[in-house]
Image (cartoon, helix red, strand yellow):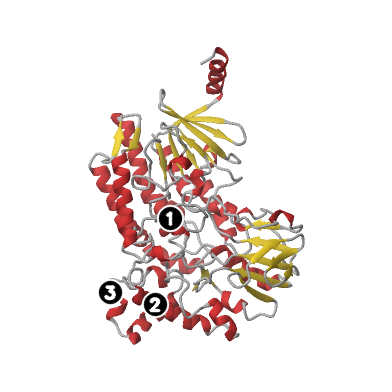
Amino acid sequence: MSARSDATSMAQHASEQSFDVIVVGAGFAGLYQLYQLRKKGFSVRLLEAGAKPGGIWYWNCYPGARVDTHVPIYEYSMESLWQEWNWSERFPGRDELRRYFDYVDEKLDLSRDIDYDTRVTGAEFDTQENQWRIETESGPLYSAQYFVLCTGFAAKPYIPDLKGLKEFQGPCHHTALWPQEGLDLAGKRVGVIGTGASGVQVIQEAAAEAAHLTIFQRTPMIALPMQQQALSPEGQAREKLSYRERYARRPETGAGFDYTGREDTALEHSQEERDAVYDGLWQAGGLRFWAANFMDIGRDEDANLTAYNFWKERTRARIKDPALHEKLAPDVPPHPFGTKRPSLEQNYYEVFNQDNVHLVDLKDTPILEITESGIRTGEKHIDLDVIVLATGFDAVTGGLTQIDIRGTQGKTLKEKWAEGVRTHLGIASTGFPNLLFLYGPQSPAGFCNGPTCAEVQGDWIIGLLEHMRGGNGRRIEPTAKAEETWNGIMEEIVADTLLPKADSWYMGANIPGKPRQLLNFPGVAIYMDFCKACADNGYEGFSIS
């Protein structure tokens, strides 16, 4: 090293803010890490790209943004928080969720240890000092022994390569990059590209306001009835008598809810018996038709088809134009039910009965180009004032790989995972010592209620850091053998499901060139059993030095 570069390095180190732990992301997982680590005496700083806490609920400000997990399951289980908080709806909207995060922030005094408007752009591990050196877009440098990433599964929006996209003269926004001040759609000609979760929500709102709404659909969405309900403080006071038991059930279920799937199979029952079960789950609403259904729905195509056909008949009954039946609820499933995450809807299918709504099937009439004034398909030019890109995310891995994270083997995390993700327990990756991630690839992530994973997976990581602090070492990373073993477990799991039969973000199949593999571990309770066994055996699979 030259004298000049040595002096530069020394100056950079002198300007760094140093902590035991740097946490990235102020959603459920990041805030939980900050609060619990701080209580246990770690010096910790949380870095957040947004201007306020909330994670995805800071960025989700598009029309209709709403959670698809019911409360009180979609909140922290800390009694000091839920005793004094009431919701107005069973499935709260973005504004109420933002108020909840402000409430949590104030109650737990979190912001004093958070740097907002601070986007992490890179990090490199210093092998001599066993420290991560972390760079940010706004300039400040940080160092920490442990680097804990809580970026969530939907931190990197996917914008497809559409010809002429930059030529459009009106507002054009991805739902994850929506203007914080909002955008008025009233009286406008609006085009929505995509019918995933955010697309369904925007479409329901835009249909009520826009002069004309054009929906560009590639694959029909198998959406489930939300069955929204207003909540009162009096009703919640009664419900709170059972909150402790309901929260205790969360880690014991498949998806981190307060209910789990059935232990019987669809095919052992008559159609009449099956339909009675399906009707009960349908009326209960939310994700129950998906997550509390017969045990063979996700494994057996014949069983799966019985659930799909029930959905199809219920859905077609809501669509007046028979010509749209095959477009929105086709006879042959576009993919097995549940192999893509179902969206929740309130009046999505009724929207297509309106005179101001038009569906464009992109398989029949693909988009040729975006023009200054709209979208040209293979059939015609559609004039638009606003374009909404509801085109999804580089899910699960994208939030991690968009940061230039460099480990000890001369590769970035993105380069290491270029041909497929390898982790141990979905928490750490070989060659990246002291780097831990929550809600990441090969953990429950997209199959798990966020607050549940924030707490149960978060507690495990906190236990690991306490173990290290207890004199057991300064550096930890998985062994290559442990990674291959965990990847083998993931492959065994997916082979027993219908998940590979859909081009979903669960499989990484929605991003061109992304390796196709199961990115989410199905089953919170089973997953935590693996984590507990690892810890009980001295953190087996990790190299500690």
Q: Is residue 541 above or below residue 128?
A: below
Q: Position of residue 356 (x, y in %)?
A: 70, 77
Q: Which amino acid type is marked by label 1?
A: Arg
Q: Position of residue 302 (x, y in %)?
A: 35, 77
* 274, 238: nearer the viewer: 274
N-term mark: 3 or 1: 3
Between the residue at mark 3 and the residue at mark 1, the CA separation in whole angstroms equals: 31 Å
Label 2 sits on a secondary structure element that is: helix
- What residue is drawn where x is 27% and y is 80%? 268
Between the residue at mark 1 and the residue at mark 2, the CA separation in whole angstroms equals: 24 Å
- What residue is drawn where x is 50% and y is 61%? 86
User: Which residue position holds label 3?
Assistant: 264
Question: Dot 2, how many residues are within 10 Å of its Cα: few (below 14), some (14-19), or many (20+)?
Answer: some
User: Which residue position holds label 1?
Assistant: 516
Q: Please state if 486 lies on the left or on the right of 366 as rendered.
A: left
Q: Position of residue 102 (x, y in %)?
A: 56, 50
User: Which residue position holds label 2?
Assistant: 305
- What residue is drawn where x is 32% and y is 44%? 483
Quarter of the figure with residue 203: bottom right
Q: Position of residue 101 (x, y in %)?
A: 53, 52
N-term mark: 2 or 3: 3
Instruction: Give the label, 1 or 2, closer to the camera.
Output: 1
Q: Which amino acid type is marked by label 2?
A: Leu
Q: Please state if 469 lies on the left or on the right of 376 as rendered.
A: left
* 472, 325: nearer the viewer: 325
- In the rendered image, which quarter contains the C terminus? top left
